[in-house]
Every structure is written in structure tokens, then in C-alpha cells.
Image (spheres, rainbow, N blue to C red):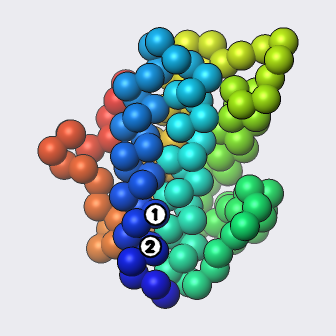
Amino acid sequence: MDPKYTSAMWDRAVSTLDAARKMASHHPDTSANRSYYAAFYAVSALFSLEQKYFKKHTGLRSAVHKELVLSGVWPQELGADYDKLLALREIADYGVAKSATQEEAFEALERARRVLQAVSEQRPGFFKLPAEQGGLDYT
């Protein structure tokens, strides 16, 4: 485990989720993108504790399902949250005829918050939530 990498990824997850929250009302595509990346960074930090690193989004998605959901560590709903974040990010980033709506941005924000909460609860000694912001309850 590289503690600097793990810490940097977790810090990035928390700050990226905060950025997503700030943009949800006025920039839903950007917010949806940031919500996905907050979850991506959080899960990457979690896997880095086991020295597992992923270069592709599909590889990390596969690990979420195989090692967290199918093993029973996470409920299926969290796996679905991760999948929906990835799908919405692709629309937000590459959609020509469709963009993320404000409602979808707020839903993505909540999905990402649940992923970060799950990572924090799984390894609370490593992944602390920002208490000064009242945790991650952005609803």
C-alpha cells in the first residue's frame, strides 16, 4: 500500500464531491461528471489498500462488482449506484443529443455520496468524512 496515494485519492474524492454539489444547480453535466469521479476516486483509494490499481474505468467497475458486490461486502444497490454514475458520466461527457438534467445531477450527487459513505464505513480509520461540512449529506 502507498499511503500517500491512498490519502490523495480519498482527499480528491471528497473535494470532487463537494465540487459536484456546488455545480449541480447550474451545470448538471459537469456535476454529473464530478459525482462519478468522486466515486471513482473513493473506490480507487479503497482498492489501493490492497495494492490494486486500475487504469481503465471498466476494470474498476468490474472490481466493484466482483470484489465488493458479489462478495457481499456491499449491497447490490451500491453496485447499481456505481453503474448509473458511470452511465450518466458518459452522457454528460459525450452526449450530443442528450445532456444530464438538473434532477439527474442531484441523483448522481446522492449516489456518489452513498459510495463515499460506504468506503468510509468500510475503513473508517483510513477514510474520514469531512465533519466540518456535516458529513456528506448534501440532500
The answer to whether 64 is drawn above or below residue 13 in the figure is below
Q: Which residue is located at x 36 percent, y 58 percent?
A: 11
Three-letter residue code for mark 2: Thr
Residue at 50% from the left image edge and 68% from the top image edge: 45
Mark 2 surroundings within 10 Å by alpha-carbon count, few (fewer than 14), some (14 through 19), many (20 or more): many
Establish if 20 lies above or below 23.
below
Residue density around tag 1, few if under 14, some if 14–19, many if 20 or more, within 10 Å: many
The reply to whether residue 123 is in sight is no
For this view, does 76 lie left or right of residue 135?
Answer: right
Q: Position of residue 46 (x, y in %)?
A: 51, 69
Determine whether, in the image, residue 50 is placed left or right of residue 113. right
Q: Which mark is residue 9?
A: 1
User: Label 2 vs label 1: CA separation?
Assistant: 5 Å
Are discs 2 and 1 less than 8 Å apart at CB? yes
Which one is in front, 121 or 86?
Answer: 86
Q: Residue at x 56, y 61 (%)?
A: 43
Dot 1 falls on a residue whose secondary structure is: helix
Q: How many marks?
A: 2
Find residue 6 and name its label. Answer: 2
The amino acid type of the residue labelled 1 equals: Met
Left or right of residue 122: residue 126? left
Which residue is at the front of the view, 61 or 29?
A: 29
Whether residue 135 is visible to the viewer of this picture, yes or no, is yes
